[in-house]
């Protein structure tokens, strides 16, 4: 679909309504009235001679033609915002504008990401930030995400990634559980305990430890309980459901307040990475690069 006949404002409205999932949300993103946004959408549809959205009482969604236009329009908008930001930077005014869409799993968002995003937003008052937390791996191109924060080990991908930091993995359980069942003294003892498996991991029941003298030990656990988020895993463990491995960032608050206890601290599990993942391309948008640099500095500090 050719977008040459559509002006910039109409394309901005298209992107905002699509990202927000409705006229009201799109108007809020743009700071415009619902009536103005509705008129712009109708005008664009009339110009192109096609319906760009399907409208129900609950949601507005892109049609196939709308998806094709969105796929062309969003990169153009990003390129224009980048050009403006670079021009401003060249004049000594590195002002970030537009919308920065960030995605991360819910627990990392609550424990680590959200406070840093709040500080970043305060530094850039002209930048709108859309923070999305989801425990599934999102399609950043399809979902219009500028940067996704991902934990662990990245699969091969055409996406670009920057390593921001790393985390340890700790074996943890609740004090009440340990009083009932005893504490494991070595990794092999874990196989006799009820294990709470985090199902989003590639091998949630097989764990490879390294001992204090570098000796390896691989243990296969048994599990009746599974969950798909670190938040649910922590709650199950705090309720005394069993033993599990948690990333150190998610486990730290519970270990500090005593609701969870770290086990086998002399045995190490592989460290995982914290990565910023973003769409491929020759240039990284100024807002994305600024946020990645800010986040990496805060994690390292």
Image (tube, grey):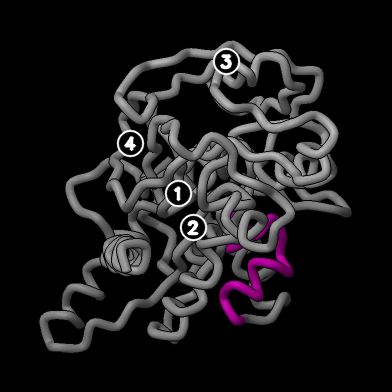
Q: Please say if 80 is above or below 138.
A: below
Which portion, as a residue range, is magenta?
16-31
- Of mark 1 and mark 4, the one earlier in the sequence is 1
Q: Which residue ends up furthest to the right in the rendered image?
A: 57
Q: Which residue position holds label 1?
A: 148
Which residue has dot 3 on it?
188
- Closer-to-camera residue (195/138): 195
In the rendered structure, does residue 24 fall within the stretch colored magenta?
Answer: yes
Q: Look at the picture and state if 165 lies above or below 101.
A: above
Q: Which quarter of the rendering shows the C terminus?
A: bottom left
Name the dominant secondary structure of the magenta segment: helix
Residue at mark 1 to residue at mark 4: CA–CA distance: 11 Å
First in sequence: mark 4 vs mark 3: 4
Task: Mark yes or no: residue 45 visible.
Answer: no
Front of the two marks 1 and 3: 3
Q: Determine which residue is flagged by label 2.
A: 102
Residue 153 screen position, x and y as percent:
40, 31
**Helix, strand or loop for disc 1:** strand
Horizontal and vertical percent for residue 193?
A: 73, 21
Q: Circle 4 is placed at which residue position?
A: 159
Q: How far apart are marks 2 and 4 (CA)?
A: 15 Å
Question: Element under label 2?
Answer: strand
């Amino acid at each position: 679909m050719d977008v040459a006949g559509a002006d910039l404002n109409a394309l901005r409205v298209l992107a905002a309504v699509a990202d927000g999932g409705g006229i009201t949300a799109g108007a809020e993103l743009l700071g415009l009235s619902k009536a103005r946004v509705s008129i712009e959408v109708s005008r664009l549809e009339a110009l192109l001679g096609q319906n760009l959205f399907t409208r129900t009482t609950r949601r507005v969604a892109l049609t196939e033609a709308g998806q094709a236009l969105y796929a062309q329009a969003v990169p153009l908008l990003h390129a224009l915002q980048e050009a403006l930001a670079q021009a401003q930077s060249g004049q000594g005014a590195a002002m970030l504008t537009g919308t920065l869409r960030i995605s991360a799993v819910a627990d990392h968002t609550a424990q680590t990401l959200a406070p840093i995003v709040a500080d970043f937003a305060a530094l850039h008052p002209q930048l709108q930030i859309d923070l999305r937390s989801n425990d599934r791996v999102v399609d950043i191109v399809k979902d219009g995400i500028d940067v996704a924060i991902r934990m662990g080990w990245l699969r091969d991908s055409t996406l670009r990634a920057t390593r921001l930091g790393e985390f340890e993995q700790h074996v943890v359980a609740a004090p009440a559980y340990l009083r009932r069942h005893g504490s494991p003294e070595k990794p092999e003892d874990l196989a006799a305990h009820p294990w709470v498996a985090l199902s989003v991991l590639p091998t949630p029941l097989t764990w490879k430890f390294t001992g204090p003298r570098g000796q390896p030990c691989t243990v296969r656990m048994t599990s009746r309980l599974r969950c798909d988020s670190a938040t649910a895993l922590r709650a199950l463990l705090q309720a005394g459901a069993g033993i599990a491995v948690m990333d150190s960032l998610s486990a730290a608050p519970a270990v500090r307040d005593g609701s969870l206890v770290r086990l086998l601290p002399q045995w190490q599990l592989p460290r995982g990475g914290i990565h910023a993942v973003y769409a491929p391309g020759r240039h990284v948008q100024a807002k994305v690069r600024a946020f990645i640099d800010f986040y990496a500095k805060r994690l390292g500090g």
